Amino acid sequence: MITGVAVYLGTRVGFALTPNGQPNSAFWPPNAILLAALLLSPRRVWWIFLVAMVPPHFVAQHQAGVPIWTAASWFLTNTTEALIGAFCITRLINPRTVFESVRGVSIFILFGVLIAPLATSFLDAAGVVLTGWGRGYVSLGAERFWTNALAELTIVPAIVLCVSNGGRWTKNAGLIQCCEAGLLGLSAVLATFLVFGFEPASPSTTPVLLFVPLALLMWATVRFGSGGLSLCLLAVSITAIWYVVNGREPFPSASVRQNVLALQILLCTVVLPLMFVSAFMTEARQAQESLRQMVCNFIKAQEQERARIGRELHDDINQRMALLAIELGQLQEHPSDVASRVQQIRQKTDEISRDVQSLSHDLHPSKLEYLGVVAGMRSWCNEFAERQGMEIDFETDVSSRISAEVGVCLFRVLQEALHNAAKHSGVKHIEVRLAERSHAVHLVVIDSGMGFDIEPAMLGKGLGLTSMRERVLLVDGTISIESKPMGGTTIRVCIPLDSAETSQCAAG
């Protein structure tokens, strides 16, 4: 319903911004409105939006006096343009985050602003010419392309960002920021009104005045990101086009048709680099926030690890040592029991020694230094399996020497993967594969247990998966985690072997 009303109002706005005697509007919102609606909706319900678009489209076209066959051809091309853009964009990126990265903006511009309008604008022009609504196929197609491209650049980001982030913006916006946003919007409309609403003192000043709104667009980009840029550009575009269509021609020597085309090209070329700047700034802010969160998480992890070691020493090792001291004291009081109890005391001493050694290995994998990476990892797997009552199938074919940095990374990833499997998988058998392929070492850890949802786990407060990813990235490696509820978990790590440190000798 909302989309249908928006399409109807957008169509009426499009006809209101159509120069007298011209078949093409200077600004055509319906295509962009439909594209935004499709991007925000799952594909299985797209057909509902197409059906909802039929009544408002034909009612608005009839009210504007458009012949039925021309209206029908426009409906086909309008919906086709939106479908092409939405299908291509949603195949490559999450549409709700498309304007938050340089890659996303590139995909949107390529498919939503260039390919989809190019594929349908000349079909639009063909429908106009064949139904007798206009003449000049090539010029009509070119004008239609710029009309559609400008609408896509201004309307789609505004709708997608407002729907996706509007609640968060409203919640986080303070009084000063709201006042700044209001001042920016008012300044944008006022500046456009002053540039296009009055005759310049001299025709030679017109080209300079046309770039006055650029400063406000840059202000919107820096302070409010893609959302502020799109809303500010929408206000500037509609205001400027309104004046040009109604006789205020920035280039007096050109016709209204030429002035409209020049203004469309100007606005498109101005906004494109600003969209990339906004995306780059968004990525930088996200990276900064991610780094800050990572530092906080590592500090918390360090404190948690210290607390764990403290508990291990105080609640376990220290208590057992105290009991051992008591038993030794009792032995002094009853020397006759030495022969029968000394074996028990020796066994308890060995158990404490093994637990202290295990705690030491968790803190610093010394076995990697003395035994080598492969043998050290195999030994730790055997010890872990014995402690946890599990079976770990460890296989390897690595023959090259693995550097200490890469070895520690692999060992920590293996530790985290096995601890997670022991704690959450619910199975007693785990497969570990360490292989050498194409000058890289590959670690694969497989369990057939409970599994989990990867995205919530990566976004959660736990540090395990994030820590693994960051460790692997530090040595120029890649990591992939495949898991689903009741479907088991597979962790794959690939790290290139440093040729300067690689030699054909056994790694243990």
Image (spheres, rainbow, N blue to C red):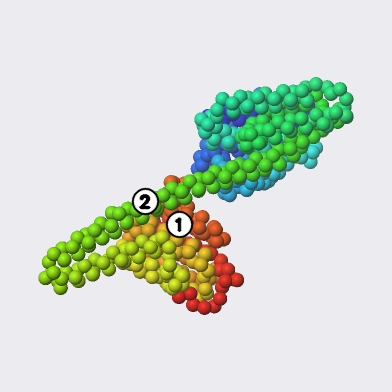
Query: Which residue does the numbered mark 2 point to in the structure image?
Result: 307
For this rendering, which residue is in front, 11 or 217? 217
Question: In this rendering, does residue 319 appear at all?
Answer: yes
Say which element carries label 1: strand
Say which element carries label 2: helix
Query: Disc number at residue 125?
Result: none
Q: What residue is rendered at 60% in x and 38% in y?
A: 35
Horizontal and vertical percent position of residue 391 = 33, 67
Q: Earlier in the sequence, mark 2 or mark 1?
A: 2
Query: Which residue does the numbered mark 1 point to in the structure image?
Result: 482
Q: Is residue 272 found left or right of 374 in the rendered image? A: right
Q: Neighbour class for label 2 at 10 Å: few (<14), some, many (≥20)? A: few
Label 2 and label 1: CA atoms lie apart by 31 Å
Question: In this rendering, does residue 66 appear at all?
Answer: no
Q: Is residue 458 found left or right of 357 in the rendered image? A: right
User: As shown in the figure, which amino acid type bears the numbered disc 2?
Assistant: Ala
Are discs 2 and 1 less than 8 Å apart at CB?
Answer: no
Q: What residue is rendered at 52% in x and 59% in y?
A: 472
Name the image quarter holding the C terminus.
bottom left
User: As shown in the figure, which amino acid type bears the numbered disc 1?
Assistant: Glu
